Amino acid sequence: MNRRQRLWVLLLGLAGVAALLVAAAFRLPTFGSDFHPYGDRAVHEALARHTANAIAAVNFDQRAFDTLGEESILFGAVLGTVVLLRQARDEHQVTPAPARVAAPVRRYALVLLPVTLVTGLYIVAHGQLTPGGGFQGGVVAATALHLLYIAVDYRALERIRPLGLFEVGDAVGEAAYLITGAAGLLAGTAYLTNALPLGTLDSLASGGTVPLLNAAIGMEVACAVVVLLARFLDQAVEIEEEGDRS
Amino acid sequence: MNHLLPLVIVTPLLGAALLVAAGRFVPRPAAEALACALAAATAALALHLLLHAPSPVIDWLGAWTPRNGHSVGIVLHADRLALGTAALVSLLVLAVLVYSWRYFDEPPRKHAGSFPALVLLFQAGMCGFVLTGDLFNAFVFFELMGVVAYALTGYRVEAAKAVQGGLTFGVVNSLGAYAMLMGVGLLYARTGELAMRHIGAALDARGAPDALVLAAFVLLLTGLLVKAAAVPFHFWLPDAHAVAPTPVCMLLSGVMVELGVYGTARIYWTIFSGPGGIPPETVAHTLLTFGVLSAAVGALMCWYQRHIKRLLAFSTVAHTGLFLIGLALLAPEATGGTALYLIGHAGVKAALFACAGILLDRYGSIDEYALHGRARELRLTAACFTAGGLALAGLPPFGTALGKAVTEEAAGPWLTALFVLVSAVTGGAVLRVAARVFGGHGTPPAAGEERETSGEGERPETEQQLTRVPATMLAVPGVLLVGALLAGVLPALHSAVGSAADEAAPGVTVALTPPHWSAPGILLGLLSAAVAAGLAVLAVRRPQHTRSRHWLDPLRLLHSGHIGDYVAWTLAGTTLLGALALTGLL
C-alpha cells in the first residue's frame, strides 16, 4: 500500500476503535464512586493475613500465581534477549577504550552507589509493609551497579559484574518462587498457599510467605535487569560487525 | 489430586529455570534430554488428570476458595477439553524437542540450554492459557507465550529478515494483547470479578448487554483473533513462519495459532453466552464472517506461494478460518468435529513443517522452483510430505478428514462446499510441491520476474548442510502423521473428544452421538482429496510462464512486510469486528 492508502485504512481503524472506547467509557462506573467489590475484599483479606501493604498481599498472596506468570515473562524476555543479542558469526568483540570522567561526576556516582544498593535492598525487604517490593527494589539495586559505568568505565563495571553468576541468579530467583509455591503442595494444600506463620502486622516478619516471594522476585529482577542491560551495553560498546573497524 | 493441576504449568517453568542455571555447565545433549524428560512428564501429568480425575478439575491457587460466591484468588478450571488441549500442546512440544535434537549450528556460547528453555517456557505459557479459569491470568499466560514466541521466531539473528519477522510478530501481537487487556479492564470495572465464570454470572445478573459489554467482547476477541491469525489480523503469521526456525514453526502453526480459536470459544462460552452477554446469532455471524474471510484468503494465498514455509503458513490461515466457522455454528456436533479437526491438523501441519525443515537443511533452499526434482532421493520424506498433503486435503481416515466431515454435516451445503474447496486447494498446493520437488514432474520453470517471495538463499539451520537425514528428524513427522491417522480411526478417542466438547460448551444437557464416520462424510473427504490431487496434476502439467501481471496481485501486495500496514489492518479489523457485533445488538 502507498502512504495514502495506509493512512485511509489507519484512519478508518482508529475511528472505529475510538468510537468503541468512547461508547464503553461512558458506561464505566463513575469516578469516585464507592463501588469497589474486589478492593474491599482484597484489603479485608490482606489484613487478615497480617500484610500491611495490601498491594503486596494481592501480588504475592491472593494472586501470587499472576506474579509467577509475570516473573516468567521477565525471565523469558531476558532469555530471549540473551539469545537474540548473542555475538553472531559475522561479529567480533573489541575492548572498549576508557574515557575521561569529570571528577565531580565520578565522586557523586561513587558515593551514590552504596546508597542506591542499600535503598534497593530496603525496598525489597519492606515490600510487605510499605509501597515497593521485589520488582521495584530489584530494579533499584540493579541500577546501583551501573553507576560504576558512569563513575569509572565499562571495564570496571564488567569486573564487578560476573555475568554468569547473574544469569544463574536470575534462574535461581525464578526457581525459588516456584519451589516456595510447591511448599503448599507438600503441606497437603493448594499450590502457593500462604502456610507460614503470619507474624505481627506491621513488623518485618509478617505476611507469611509474602516476604519470601518478594525476596525471590527481588533476586530475579535485579539479576535480570543486570543481564538485560549487559546485553544491550555489550552490543553498543563491545560488539562490532565485520568490517566496522576502519 | 486437584492440587496437582498447577504442576502442568510449573514443571516446564522449573525446567526452564534449571536449564538456564545449569546450561553453562552441562553439555548440549544433557540439556536437551532434561528438556525432553520434563516436557514428557508434563504431558503424562496432563493425560493422567484427563483420564483419572473427575472432570472438571478445579483448583483455587493459594487455597482461596470462594466465600459467599466471591474469591480474591485465581482458579484453574480444567475440564476435559482444557486438559486434552494441554496434553496435545505438551506432546507436540516433546515432538519438537526430539526433532531439534540435531538442530541449530551454534547454541549461543555457554548457553546450551537456552533453546530448550525457551521451548519449555512456551509450553508453560500455552498450558497456563488453556487451564486457567481467570481472565487476567489468561492474559498473563497469553503474554508469556507471546514474548517467548517472538524470541524464538527471531532466533537466527544472522539473517536480518529473521529479526524483521520477529519484530512484526511482536508488534502486531502486542497490539492484540493491549486490546485484550483493555477488554479485561472493562469487564473488571463492570463486575469487580476476574474469574471467568464469576464475570459471566455478574453480567447475567445485570441484564441485557450495553456498549461496555460489547466493547469488552470486541477487544477480547481482537486479541484472540490476532493470535488465531484471522484475516485481516493475519499478516504477521506468514512473515513469522517464513523466518522462524522449523521446530518453532511446528509449534506456532500446530498449536499456538489454534489456541486463539480455543480462547475465543472459552471466552464466549464462559463469559458472553448468557443473557447478559452477546446474543448467539451475533456471535455466529461475526465469527462466520471472519472464518469465511480467513479460509478464502488463506487458501488463495497458499496456492500462489513458492516459498514452502510461507505456503504452509497460509494453509494454517485457511484452516484456522475453517475452525472459526466450525465454532461459529454454535452446534455441539460442530464443536466436537472442530476439536477433532484441530487435533488432526496439529499433527499434519507439524509433520509438513518437519519435512520442509529437512529440505531446508539438506539443500539450503526452501523454494519450490529451485528445488525442482532435487529431492528425488529422499523417499521417506517424500512419502511423509505427500501423506501430509492428502491428510490436509481431508483424505479418510485421517483425523482431519473425520473432523471436517462431522463439521460439514452440521454446516449446511454452502459451507460444506467451502470446506471442500479450501481443504482441496491447500492440500493441492502441498501435493503440487511434492510432485515438483520430490518427483521432478513438470518442466522446471524458467527464471523470470516474480513478485512472490522466493525461498532461495536460505541458510540451513543445522551445523552443516546435511548429507543424510538424521533418524530423529525423519521419525518425528512419521510419528505425527500416525498420530493424525489414529485420531481418525480410534472410536474411543472420538467419543472422548465429543463428550469433552459437549461438556465444555454451555447448554448441552443430553448425551450426543460422538463424532463418527458417515457415508457422505467419507465421500466428501475422498472428493476433496481427489480435487486436491487433480489441482496438483493440472498445476504441474501446465507450462510455466512467468506473467508480469496476475489477478491476485492486489491481494498479494497487501502482504507487504510493512509493519505500518499491518497495524492499520489490525485496527481496521477491530472496527469490522465492532461493526459486526453492533449490527447484531441493534
Image (tube, coloured by chain):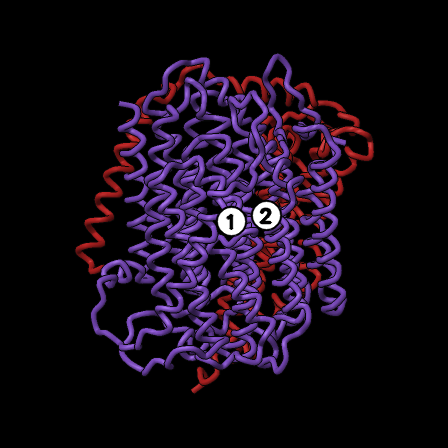
Say which quarter of the image contains residue B22.
bottom right
Q: Colour of chain B?
A: purple
Q: Position of residue B287 (x, y in %)?
A: 37, 37
Judged from this view, the residue extending furthest toward the right is A187
Q: Amino acid at mark 2?
A: Gly
Specify few, some or many for label 2: CA neighbours under 10 Å numbering under 14, 14-19, or 20 or more. Answer: many
Among the chains pictured, the one given red colouring is: A
Q: Amino acid at mark 1?
A: Ala
The residue carrying mark 1 is B401
Q: Are marks 1 and 2 on the same chain?
A: yes
- Residue A233 is left or right of residue B322, and the answer is right
- Residue B168 is left or right of residue B53, and the answer is left
From what the image shows, is residue B77 above or below residue A122? above
Say which quarter of the image contains residue A22.
top left
Quadrant placement of the C terminus of chain A:
bottom left
Q: Given the image, what chain letter belongs to the residue carrying mark 2?
A: B
Q: Nearer the viewer, residue B481 or B3?
A: B481
Q: Position of residue B461 (x, y in %)?
A: 56, 73
Judged from this view, the residue extending furthest toward the front is B519
Q: How far separated are the C-alphas under marks 1 and 2?
A: 7 Å
The residue carrying mark 2 is B488
Q: Please report the residue visible at 46 percent of the width from the left and 30 percent of the height from the top.
A: B331
Q: Secondary structure at mark 1?
A: helix
